[in-house]
Amino acid sequence: MSNQTHSMSLVTEPTDASERRSKPPVVCYTVENLPTFDANFYDKARSSMRKVSEVIVNPRDASTFEVPAGHIFRIVSTEGSQVGDLNLWNAADLNERFFSGKTRQLHASHVTTGDRLWSNLPGLRPMATITHDTLAWYGYDEDGAGVHDVIGTRCDPYTNFMLKGVDYHYCCHSNLTRALALTKGISTQEAEPYVHDVLNVFMCTGFTLDTHQYFMKASPVRPGDYIEFFAEIDLLGALSACPGGDCGSSHSDDATTCYPLIVEIYKPSSEALEDWMPQDRNAYVGTHGL
């Protein structure tokens, strides 16, 4: 029995418990004023794009990549079912990075075509827009699971040591840290604070209906599937090919079969982008009442 369950058993339910529980849910943010997803614009950009580069992400490792504003990148499944952990930064300022919590609040627990990846405060602007997702058909299954989550963090060596008492250096947190350190020519100690909560690409997750614990199940991704993004600002990205493979059994060990992922970079035509501008930082005055 968990501590929470044990403590709840010692608490007397109030007489008005049913009435308190019956309050209607209210969505936290009304999002009508968010920038609209202009499908025609993104389709025009996609139809005119040409591939300019690609980066291979090896199993149980991470690689970085750069995407200029106005370009498109795809994360592609290649040889087998594999989950990836994605970090994004403003290419010119590592302090501006992907904000999974706000992305979750503005969109949903799992993201797909038309959703955006937002940056942290005080920038709070779209960093990338999802323009295509071959797994959009999955939706939410009978366990409540969906694909591409922004609820989990990333597997890390600290939690692994706490739970198992073993050093494991190829968790996604460590993979992303090494990749950023190598790219920026800094130590892992300097790089680590910039590594942040991820978009769990291709990962199939949810919360159990009884205990409400975060769970993972085997990803539905197959070779040839991809998720595609339009870069709304100049981006530096890092992608880890998770040691959990398809995350259907375990992670933070070498027991699971893992596969590489590929990041493909595309450049749309100048004509497709003639009326487009990179996203500005949030316009809040920044005084916080003083």
Image: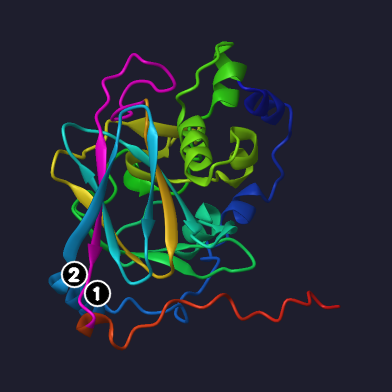
Q: Considering only vertical position in the picture, is 281 above or below 214? A: below
**Circle count:** 2
Contact between labelled residues 1 and 2, with CB atoms less than 8 Å apart: yes
Q: Quadrant of residue 195?
A: top right
Q: Which residue is mark 2?
A: 46
Q: Is residue 203 above or below residue 45?
A: above
Q: Is residue 283 magenta?
A: no
Residue that label 1 marks: 42
Q: Position of residue 158 (x, y in %)?
A: 60, 25
As drawn, which residue projects farthest toward the right? 290
Report the magenta residues as a range. 244-270
| Residue at the image position 70 percent from the left and 46 percent from the top | 15
Element at label 2: helix
Q: Main secondary structure of the magenta part?
A: loop
Element on which disc 1 rests: helix
Query: Callout 1 environment at 10 Å: few (<14), some (14 to 19), or many (20+)?
Result: many
In this view of the protein, can residue 113 be seen by the observer?
Answer: no
Q: Position of residue 215 (x, y in %)?
A: 42, 32
Task: Give the residue displayed 42% in from the left and 77% down from the top.
Answer: 278
**Residue 105: horizontal and vertical position, in percent?**
51, 60
Q: Amino acid at mark 1?
A: Tyr
Q: Amino acid at mark 2?
A: Arg
Q: How is the image coloured?
A: rainbow
